[in-house]
Amino acid sequence: MVRDNNPNLINFTFIFSNKRTSNLGVLLLFYPIIFTMNQLQLIVNQIFTDSFNEKPMIVRSPGRVNLIGEHTDYNGGFVLPAATDKSAYLAISPSVTNTGKWVSVDMGETVEINFDEIKFYQNHRWINYILGVVQQFENRGMKIPPFNCVLAGDVPIGSGMSSSAAMESAVGFALNEMNGFGLNKKQLAQLVQQAENEFIGVKCGIMDMFASIHGKENNVIRLDCETLEYQYFPLNLGDYKIVLFDSGVKHNLVESEYNLRRQQCEEGLTFFRKHFDESVKNLSQVPLSWLQSSKSQLDPIVYKRCQYVIEENQRILSACENLQAGNLKDFGIKMTATHEGLRNLYEVSCKELDFLVDAVWHESSVLGSRVMGGGFGGCTINLIKANAIDELFDRLSVSYKQNMGIKLKTYSVVTANGTELVICD
Ligand code: ADP
Ligand code: MG
């Protein structure tokens, strides 16, 4: 078994030793046992029942990984995410008063919510991920009556698996079900994205919530970010597993460099519209031949950025053919090629991420390895033969500590279904 460094478990230890939890009752005594059984739904169910004396509705909503397709979303291209077993669990029920009590197991907090005013909570940030979704329903004319809820999760926070989208999607799905609003999955994903964009203020694309809501076990979702059309492709991993190595760094270049990349891509697109075809919708649709014939006219940096985006989009299409043919080996080679593109052309890697990729990609047990997410830190995603994972992690963590001075963390991930109701008897 891969050692799973779950920060939420550490959070729990904090709660457990903290007197604030006394209102959660005896149940927490058994929390670690239940936790290792990976049955967080039992936890939220029992805390809810103990606290509110009634049976809640329970929703599970997964985190996500992205196999290939980085920085393609805002260029109108494809992404290839899969929903994970690591999920947020939300127990919820209407409140009989005009306030609601919201409990975060992981943060060890219970907060009383006044539904008459939706305000940003600076000191209890997790609440905003629920309130932002409430606000989006109300903006659409769907009044949300007061509700109580209990939330727990095992999506590692801030590690690139999108714990925020898991939580927001759980809330969106639950409120839609509970109030019979009848929004479909695509509308829910859009609503949740808007909540994160507007209330949290993170200008993310739609991939995270779309993947959380639409996930399917043993499948990746090829999502066209321009049209939101999507298709499932089988991810039959056989003897292999998806393993994340957490670099433990997050360089503060992320936001400024992200904006700069967007600007450079925009510059490229404007050029192709002017010189080739005004109606081309986005950079991902530009043929490589247009780019190659424009080398002398384009700024060399803009050229590199465009080359990455166009190649990455093509790579996703052929990676999906590999999956359909059950050719995991070629799929893995494409993952590593993505890393090379992100490192050399898009220039969003960093020495820690390059170290983690360079140290493993040539190993016979590794099919592919690349940075996952926006770059400048976070995790690498790897396809590794199951029986080699422990030994590889041991070696890698020693050399990572020696060379980068950082303790390596790892998460193993299994694909899973998207947001769903779960039953607790
Ligand atoms: P990520 O990359 O994991 O999405 P973000 O910074 O976008 O990281 O979101 C993390 C925030 O989402 C946390 O700081 C917390 O406020 C909220 N959150 C995520 N999961 C949970 C959870 N299980 N319980 C409470 N809050 C959570
Ligand atoms: Mg997030």
Image (cartoon, grey):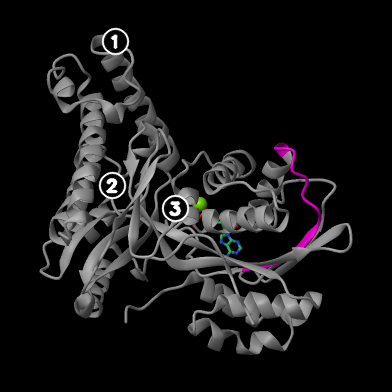
- Residue 274's label in the rendered image is 1
Front in this rendered view, residue 158 or 70: 70
The image shows residue 260 at horizontal and vertical percentages of: 38, 30
Amino acid marked by disc 3: Ala
Mark 3: give few (<14), some (14-19) or many (20+) Cα within 10 Å.
Answer: many
| Circle 2: element type | loop
Task: Say if the magenta span includes residue 203.
Answer: no
Disc 2/disc 3 C-alpha distance (Å): 24 Å
Quarter of the image where one finds residue 151? bottom right
Amino acid marked by disc 2: Ser
Mark 2: give few (<14), some (14-19) or many (20+) Cα within 10 Å.
Answer: many
- If you read the primary sequence from the N terminus, does the residue marked by circle 2 or circle 3 appear first? 3
- If you read the primary sequence from the N terminus, does the residue marked by circle 2 or circle 1 appear first? 1
- If you read the primary sequence from the N terminus, does the residue marked by circle 3 or circle 1 appear first? 3
Comparing labels 3 and 1, the label whose residue is closer to the camera: 3
Q: Which residue is mark 3?
A: 211
Q: Quadrant of the N terminus?
A: bottom left
Determine contact: label 3, label 1, CB under 8 Å.
no
Mark 1: give few (<14), some (14-19) or many (20+) Cα within 10 Å.
Answer: few
Amino acid marked by disc 1: Lys
Left or right of 139: which side holds 306? left
Task: Say if the magenta span includes residue 146.
Answer: yes
In magenta, the rendered stretch is 139-151
Q: Residue furthest right?
A: 97
